Image: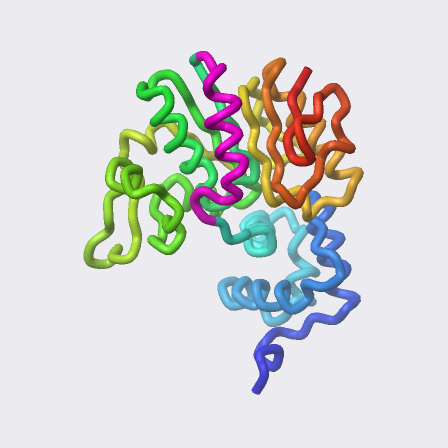
Amino acid sequence: MNQTDSLPELTDELYFELSNWLKAEVGVDLGDTRKTMMAGRLAKVLNSFNIPSIQELRRIIDHPDQIKLKMVVIDNLTTHETYFFRESEHIDFLEQIILPKATAPFNVWSAACSTGEEAFTLGLILAEHFRSMSQWEILGTDISSAVVAQSQRGLFPNSRLKLVPGELLKKYFKKGINQQEGNSVVTKELKDHLNFKVDNLLDPKTQGPFNVIFCRNVLIYFDNPTKQKVIHNLLDRLKPGGYLISGRCEPIRQFAKNAKVINHSILKRV
């Protein structure tokens, strides 16, 4: 039996209908090639909610009494794997270019933060730079309530910590034991200075202003009009002279209205 034999039925027509629904809800564009991924992730939802088919799920998902189901579907279709110190050139830019000129208080927004690896990476950098926990804050947001809840725990598989320098591992993490063996948890001292909440980049409730906003590896899922809207929302929440940093495969120079282009993935608000 091949992998697709055990997946729930998902016709092309229903795939594109659900893809368009997801795009309208949160701006994420799955494109034409993620049908198997969608079927696999929705299989878990069908199981959890005892729904017989994806077709039935689509029929009921927008009912006012199905808010929990709706959020679980969005969670499952927008959750992406990440790890600490991802795309190190942006961490280097923060350490070498931004922070030497920074003054406290210093506020960072990790937008579309997934399970929190990026936000806590930034926390490690700021804690080491400022040496005082009262001089900086980080906000992490994501459209998925499930991954926000995971971020708040500050508990990570050790496999995602491989790029964390040894001295920072010893200083800011505690290794899990018994049921948590193979995981590590962020120390309370660090965790207390990061906040996480659910927010939608298309219509963010987050206000700022921030010194730096990281929004990496999510813009690639948006079409150009949606990217324009999201980037406008983010730039509007930066302090003058603040930086917006996207993923290295997400060029944003073409959306640099009211901003100076630093490179293809970094803008500075003017």
The answer to whether residue 44 is above or below residue 71 is below
The answer to whether residue 147 is above or below residue 13 is above
Which residue does the image show at 60% across and 45% down from the upper left?
Answer: 217
Q: How is the image coloured?
A: rainbow
First to last magenta residue range: 83-103
Q: Is residue 21 magenta?
A: no
Which residue does the image show at 28% across and 57% down from the upper left?
Answer: 182
- Residue furthest out toward the front: 96
The answer to whether residue 52 is above or below residue 90 is below
Coordinates of residue 152 in the picture (x, y in percent): 39, 39
Coordinates of residue 168 in the picture (x, y in percent): 30, 37
Of residues 65 and 28, the one nearer the viewer is 28
Which residue does the image show at 49% across and 15% down from the upper left?
Answer: 101
Coordinates of residue 143 in the picture (x, y in percent): 57, 42
One can see residue 26 in this view: no
Q: Give left or right: position of 193 versus 20.
A: left
Would you identify the image quadrant in which residue 212 lies? top right
Q: Give left or right: position of 98 versus 221.
A: left
Of residues 52 and 237, the one nearer the viewer is 237
Specify the quadrant that holds the C terminus.
Answer: top right
One can see residue 38 in this view: yes
Coordinates of residue 158 in the picture (x, y in percent): 33, 53
